[in-house]
Amino acid sequence: MFSKSLYFPTRKKLRNLNRFWQIIYCNIGNPHPLGQLPIKFFREVLALCDHTSLLDESETHGLFSTDAIDRAWKILDQIPGRASGAYSHSQGIKGLRDTIAAAIEARDGDTIAAATEARDGFPADPNDLFLTDGASPAVHMMMQLLISSEKDGILCLIPQNPLYSASITLHGGSLVPYYLDEATGWGLEISNVKKQLEEARSKGITVRALVVINPGNPTGQVTGFTPDVREQIYKMASINLCSNISGQILASLIMSPPKPGDDSYDSYMAERDGILSSMARRAKVS
């Protein structure tokens, strides 16, 4: 279907079909072409970090919110040379990783999490974080690290996002499938995983990693796994997924948004809640 959708516009077939006039591509998570507006605060900070001369202009205070200007200065102070177009450490800028790690650790009532829902409070070391340009580069990075030949296998769930199977093939590895059961809420039997593991070994394949994303890509929720199954998976193995600097800045802003009392707080909450309520309505319709 996707391949045909690419054919129609290039061959000007839409008009001849007399059935539809426009193709809306929903095969990837790309909401902005469908009308979802970006968060203003995020874009303001990114614009100021990319066009730093604006920070020296008096007119800027009339065009940008005060907290966006303050945040841009703080972020630029963490970037060597204050150059958002330069290369960074392959893991991401240390100061931005510090912000993200603090937000992962924050609980309800902490400064960073005050404007958002309570976070889980998991311990997070910024030295263990890698900031990437979305999931695809992270997956490719892991595959490049783990795969050296077709004798290297990756245990990958079925159904799955084609990103994983395609990445395994691209890097010359072998996909070792394990299967989810729709009837049990996309759960799995650990015996099935062990069976696939043993079968791969009998073929001379060394399984290097296990992909666990069940099956809610790209949101990443893991559902349908009982606590007992999760414990067994943790015992077996797990896989956790240099980005551009603007992407790193955005990640830090998402994890540390405006707080109550900041100039951008009201507009940020209105925009964020509008997006979430729209998603909730569409989820009920579907």
Image: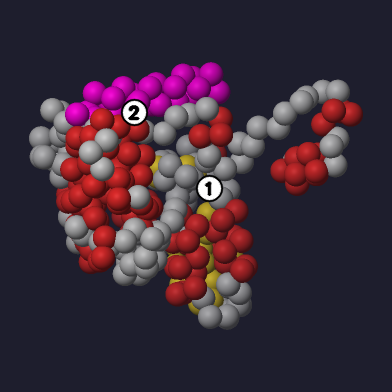
Quadrant assignment, res 25? top right
* Residue 240 on the magenta segment: no
Q: In the rendering, at what x and y percent does residue 265 appear?
A: 22, 28
Q: Nearer the viewer, residue 218 or 72?
A: 72
User: Which amino acid, mark 2?
Assistant: Arg
Report the side of 268 relative to 157 (left or right).
Answer: left
Seen at 35% across and 50% down, the residue is: 51
Q: Which residues lie in the magenta part?
A: 263-286
Hey, what amino acid is under mark 1? Leu
Category of crowding for the residue at label 2, using alpha-carbon neighbours closer than 10 angstroms: few (below 14), some (14–19), many (at least 20): some
From the viewer's perspective, is 87 left or right of 283? left
Disc number at residue 272? 2
Q: Is residue 189 left or right of residue 59?
A: right
Q: Is 252 or 120 nearer to us in this picture?
A: 252
Which residue does the numbered mark 1 point to in the structure image? 180
Residue at left 61%, top 74%?
172
Measure the alpha-carbon separation of dots 1 and 2: 33 Å
Badge 1 vs badge 2, beta-carbon distance below 8 Å: no
Residue 279 visible, this orientation: yes
Residue 33 location, x and y as percent?
A: 56, 34
Residue 216 in the image, given as x and y percentages of width and height: 47, 42
For marks 1 and 2, the one nearer the N-term is 1
Which mark is in front, 1 or 2? 2
Label the magenta part by its dominant secondary structure. Answer: helix
